[in-house]
Image (cartoon, rainbow, N blue to C red):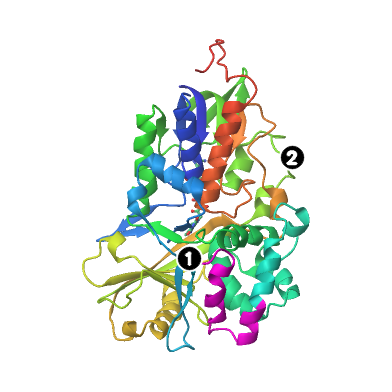
Amino acid sequence: MNARVAVLGGGLAGITAALRCADAGLDVTLLESKNHLGGLTHSFRRGELDVDNGQHVFLRCCTSYVDLLRRLGVLDKVFLQPRLAIQVRSPRLRQPVWLRRNALPAPLHLADSVLKYRPLPVADRLKFAGAALALRGVDRESAAADGQSFADWLRRHGQSTAAIEKLWDLVGIATLNAPATGASLALAATVFQLGLLTEAGAADIGWSKVPLRELHGEPAKARLTEAGAQVLLGTKVTGLAREDGRWRITAGETELTADRVVVALPPEVAERLLPPGALSLPEGWAKRLGSSPIVNAHVVFDREVLDEPFFAAVDSPLQWVFDRTSQSGVDGGQYLAVSLSAADDLIDVPVREIRERILPALRQVVPAAATAGVRDFFVTRERTATFRPAPGSAALRPGPVTAAEGVVLAGAWTATGWPATMEGAVRSGEAAASALIASDGRPTSPHGKDIP
Ligand SMILES: Cc1cc2nc3c(=O)[nH]c(=O)nc-3n(C[C@H](O)[C@H](O)[C@H](O)COP(=O)(O)OP(=O)(O)OC[C@H]3O[C@@H](n4cnc5c(N)ncnc54)[C@H](O)[C@@H]3O)c2cc1C
């Protein structure tokens, strides 16, 4: 087979790059090892349920991701809060509190919520503003900021352990997939500057009203096919080698020759397949970059127990809890997903033990759950959900251009400036496609025919 552009990997990064190239008139073949597109955003059937591999949310500031949804024709399948409102529950509080934005411009839009934030003592609430303002001034591009731990920086700016755990980590752990103690200041500054400290509406939260496969994987396959791209599913790439001025891609029985290649694969697969010298990174960089797990505990109650679409929890092993009833198609009762980020301590724990930790904690903060029966309890685990956003990680995230002629890189783990998010993945796909399309001369086949 011949392809002008081969895209390896069909996650959001690969989908975006492939669509961009196909829309630019290039002849594209996408190779994906699984039998579906969507990568780390996928769903499966469990009896009567449609289950996502893990709850995914986006923010209003995720403009590239929203552009992709528009291109996929699925914007009507997501909900975006008109105004940020996060309900926070704690077993120590009789009533939930709210983090809501008011009508003021950032960063004043959250001031009254923080001042009324009862999980923290008043002194901590008052000290929040100083650190928030200082965080606005952090240069998120600087290596010095990347080399520091966010928690150390917060402590130096007057934040107590309680403030870090109950306020900064509430947002940070879900967006960075690391607590402040394990996160690079530069990445944390990106999240807080873009989400909370610059534009008042930036952190309004959005989520899918349908299972993820209906939002990403299935429409992506349809749109790519309509755009003239070829999508090869169940095709695991095992080799990438230069031959006669072109790239030979091996995937089991399949052999493909391409002028240009977008490598949109997880870091360890990319390191294995990229030709030596393609990146100026030390051998073993993918392992050094590392990964961080996410676990979701799924609970189907026999009745409705929660009247909010989601809440966050403090003083509790729960982090964020989402109502999944309508997306899952469950017949009666209510389906909640407990999303547990930075789940190093849970990734290998048996379901029974996770149930023993999570169910009582859920019943503490959702009183109606105390008397409800549990129809189903199961766990999904993503061991390599994201790269580890540790101090120093920026140096291990290459940009789209490689030293291998015609090979560009994409993936949420590449140098997008963002943590590993859907937005980061889409941005990386856009950057890779732009680099490929704009690269020196037009990609040329060995027969000298220019790509249109
Ligand atoms: C449980 C969970 C919850 C998350 N929550 C959020 C959230 O709320 N908000 C948010 O923005 N982000 C969230 N993320 C992160 C987000 O899903 C990822 O950052 C993003 O989907 C990564 O996309 P990608 O294309 O870079 O990588 P991937 O999705 O990993 O895509 C790589 C693709 O390459 C394929 N592949 C691997 N090896 C080969 C091979 N040899 N040959 C061919 N194909 C191969 C893989 O199957 C995969 O499809 C979450 C992730 C997880 C796991």
Q: Residue at x 70, y 49 (%)?
A: 396
Q: Residue furthest left?
A: 331
Q: Nearer the viewer, residue 48 or 169?
A: 169
Residue 187 quadrant: bottom right
User: From mark 2 to mark 1, how far is it between C-alphas?
Assistant: 33 Å
Q: Amino acid at mark 1?
A: Val
Asked if disc 1 is less than 8 Å from ligand 1, the answer is yes
Seen in the picture, residue 243 relative to 273 is either above or below; the reply is above
Q: Position of residue 81 (x, y in %)?
A: 41, 62
Q: Residue at x 67, y 30 (%)?
A: 404
Residue 246 quadrant: top right
- The answer to whether any part of residue 184 appears in the image is no
Q: Is residue 73 left or right of residue 401?
A: left
Q: Position of residue 45 (x, y in %)?
A: 30, 56
The magenta stretch is: 103-127
Q: Amino acid at mark 2?
A: Ser
Residue on which the image places disc 1 = 295
The disc at residue 78 is none
Residue 111: in magenta span: yes
- The answer to whether any part of residue 423 appears in the image is yes
Looking at the image, tell me whether mark 2 or mark 1 is earlier in sequence order: 2
Image quadrant holding the N terminus, namely: top left
Seen in the picture, residue 281 relative to 61 is either above or below; the reply is above
The disc at residue 280 is 2
Q: Nearer the viewer, residue 365 or 193?
A: 193
